[in-house]
Each structure stands twice: as C-alpha cells, then as structure tokens.
Image: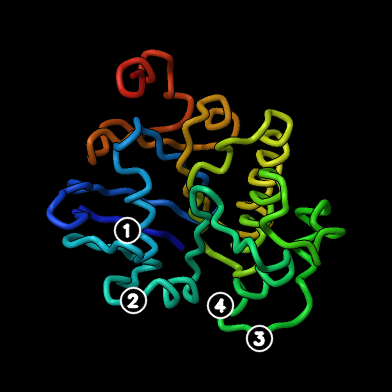
Amino acid sequence: MSLQVSAIDTFYGTSHILHGVSLEIGEGELLAVLGRNGAGKTTLLRSITGINPPRRGLVRLDGVDLKRLKSHERTRLGVSYVPQGREIIPDLTVAENIYVALLGKGRKRGRVPDLVFDYFPALRPLVDQKGGTLSGGQQQQLAIARALVQEPKFLLMDEPTEGLQPSVVEEVELIIKRIPSERKCAVLLVEQNLDFVRDIAQRFAILDTGRIVREGDVAGLTNEVVQRHLSV
C-alpha cells in the first residue's frame, strides 16, 4: 500500500507553486515535509487531497490515479486531512464535528466512535460543548479525531503543533506516534518544529521554492542540513 506523488506541478492561478515534486510513502511510515514559509508545503497537501489539484503529474493511491477524483471521493478511498489552523466548525459541538467527518466517509450519524476517546479521553466530557469554546489543544485533538474516524490509509497533517504549549505538544506527539502502527496508516506531516520532527518521523523531505531539495532518513536531518535549507 502506497501513496505516490509523481512529478506534480501545481499552480494558484498563474503562479507556479510546485515544480516537479515527487515522493512516496507506504503503510506504517511517517514522513515529515519541511521548508521555509512559502516553500509550497501546504500546497503539496492540498494537491494530494484534491483541494488544489496539480496541473501536471500524477497522484496515485495504491496505483489508482486520483486526478479526476474530488476531495470527498479521495476521502472515501482513504486520504484524510488535518488542516493548518484545525478548521473545526465552531458552532457545532464536539460530537457534531465528528458526525460531519463521518458523513464525509459515507457513514450515517451514530454515536461517537470509541476510538475518539481511546486516543483523546479529554474529549469525552466535552462531547456536547461547542468547538469554538475549546482550547487550542482541545481543538487540535478534535481535528485529529475527525480525521481518524474516517479510517484513513493515509493521514495528511499540516502544522499540528502550531500555537500549542509544550506540554500539549508532548501529548500530540504521543498520539501521532501511535497512529501508523495501530491504525495501519501512513502519516505525511508538514511541520516547522524540528525537535518534534526528529522525535517522531522516520523520513524527511525539504521543499524550497516548490522543489524537493533534500530527503532521506531523519537521522540525516543534521544541523548542517537545517542551516543550509531551513534557516531564514
């Protein structure tokens, strides 16, 4: 089982953002994508999900070309997305946010799946609380829970530690570490926190002005590599 991105070129209008980007991730792997602001990291995730499909190149899931599939069709095939900024629905309760995610997978509304409280026990007493009243850490937990109930084969996460306190970052790290093996799911993670990446990822890829300029095992994410490709 693999997700393959092959030589994609993605545009916003006439602006050429991604230039021939290729990468592959298989079951149980956690791949971190790094880069300076504006390097194209979020565009890569949006290209894979179909929110902003590439103009050229291919995105394949287990050999199936996703080019003509809409975002909800890709979700049903096994691609789920935790966006930057969480984007939970503030006027819906925790439970209702989960139900919306289940609809995206084609499932009818029912009780909140047990896996939500297995991974996020702190959400149990908050199920009837509106999403907009949650703390940043609670909202991030809800955002990840929404994606997990869709039973993804490939989970895309955009800056999951952004704006979180260090103690909450540690909680999120422990949760994400469990996902690849327990859910038999690959994780493609966009992240700026280098310590977090070194602790959690197996492989890394660095984007610079829309091109992959370095990739390898996370042990190769040395200070020299960081200084050359990521320092501002």
State the residue position of label 4: 105
Looking at the rendered structure, the secondary structure element under dot 2 is loop
Residue 72, image x, y percentages: 45, 75
Residue 76, image x, y percentages: 49, 76
Count every numbered label the image shows and give the total: 4
- Closest to the camera, between mark 3 and mark 2, is 3
* 129 relative to 9 in the view: left or right: right
Name which residue lies at 63% across and 61% down.
90
**Distance of mark 3 from mark 4, alpha carbons?**
9 Å
Q: What is the three-letter code of the residue carrying label 4?
A: Lys
**Distance of mark 1 from mark 3, alpha carbons?**
28 Å
Q: Residue furthest left?
A: 14
Residue 228, image x, y percentages: 30, 17
**Distance of mark 4 from mark 1, alpha carbons?**
19 Å
Q: Classify 146 as above or below 82.
A: below
Q: Classify 228 as above or below 86.
A: above
Q: What is the three-letter code of the residue carrying label 2?
A: Leu
